[in-house]
Image (cartoon, rainbow, N blue to C red):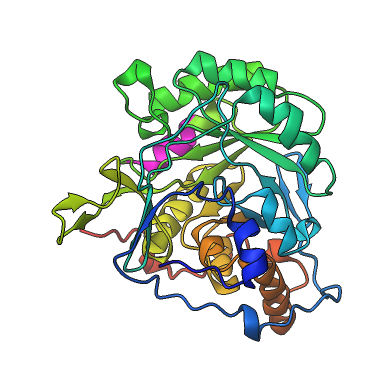
Amino acid sequence: MLRPAVPRGRQDSAAAGLLGGAGIQSSGGFGMTSRLADVKTDSREPQVDLSVRIGRLTLANPVMPASGTFAEGLEQVFDFNRLGAFVTKTITRDYRSGNPTPRVAETASGMLNSIGIPSKGLATFLSDTLPFYRRYRPPLIVSISAPTAEQFAELARELTVPGIAAIEANISCPNIEADGRAFAMLPDSTETVVRRLRAATELPLWVKLTPNTADIAAVASAAEAAGADALVVANTILGMAVDADTFRPRLGSIMGGLSGPAVKPIILRMTYQAARAVSIPVIGCGGIGTAEDAVEYLLAGATAVQVGTATFLHPNATPEIIDGLATFCCRRGIARIEDLVGALVLDDASLPAAAS
């Protein structure tokens, strides 16, 4: 079972809201170890410039939580002002109860989730959640979801208010106008929804892509052409788990999204392909649990990273990754973290190579 490595008194409140009583089904371990008790965070100013630019926004560092893996209760675990940015849990315009339980199943090197985007709705977000985040310095990125391109645009328009720094459009969600296929599976549907979003808001527009596509580069290019300011690569990979004892699926909705260390090589590859295809910033998201993981994404072309599943196992993962990036750069004599972006060393002969 997943056990966040924080003192019990903090564990209950910090975990509240992250999975919403998801009902975890365990079938293995992440292959990750918790280091909270062994790590002493260095609070001194790092001797390196960790700031990065994502379009019009300047972030103090390139590390932020992934949508759906972060909640207000974590303020009891670490100082929120250390984050590069906040990314909210995905919100919808109306109330949503989410999928049936169990919603989470642990796998050998990650986890499957089928949360179903439970949401208290736009009105509650504006009245309750937004004021909470206004207390902190990092820019607030609001993740949104909708079933049609027009409803995406309407929601973005209503969220164009003071206190929100950017919109993250989760176009990995089903498009009811395309038989339930995710918008981001195809370049055409990606371009359609992003153009609607771009026309609806003047806020910076980040577009979160799905890995469940045959051509991530083409989808990335379509999002850029339609007006995206940045791309988030990527959401979870569709998967499934079965309980051999009960003959039942481990998730209440049968299938769910795979995340954690298992997906890192796949999403790292997609990040590299997307970054080569576009000129806008790419934010890598998939299997990041250490500073070394984050460095790999930066070298592959990501300007920033999002930390997701690692937070469930180790709630202090995000600030530790920030500290680790500063340490990495200091040891390497790197003055600016942005110097790592796209710095992957390639032999000329390796450039055209592809897996058969």
Give the vertical position of 344 relative to 240 (above or below).
Answer: below
- Determine the image quadrant of residue 353: bottom left
Q: Nearer the viewer, residue 162 or 56?
A: 162
In this rendering, position of residue 202 left or right of residue 209? right
| Range of residues picked out in magenta | 215-222
In percent of width and height, residue 208 lies at 51, 39
Residue at 68% in and 30% down: 125
Q: Is residue 218 magenta?
A: yes
- Identify the residue at horizontal 78%, vertical 49% (top origin): 138
- Report which quarter residue 255 is drawn in: top left
Foreground of the two, 21 or 126? 21
Point 15% across, 60% down: residue: 244
| Quarter of the rendering containing residue 227 | top right
Instruction: Work out which quarter of the rendered image holds the C terminus and state it.
Output: bottom left
Quadrant of the image containing the N terminus? bottom left
The x, y position of residue 251, in whole percent, is 30, 48
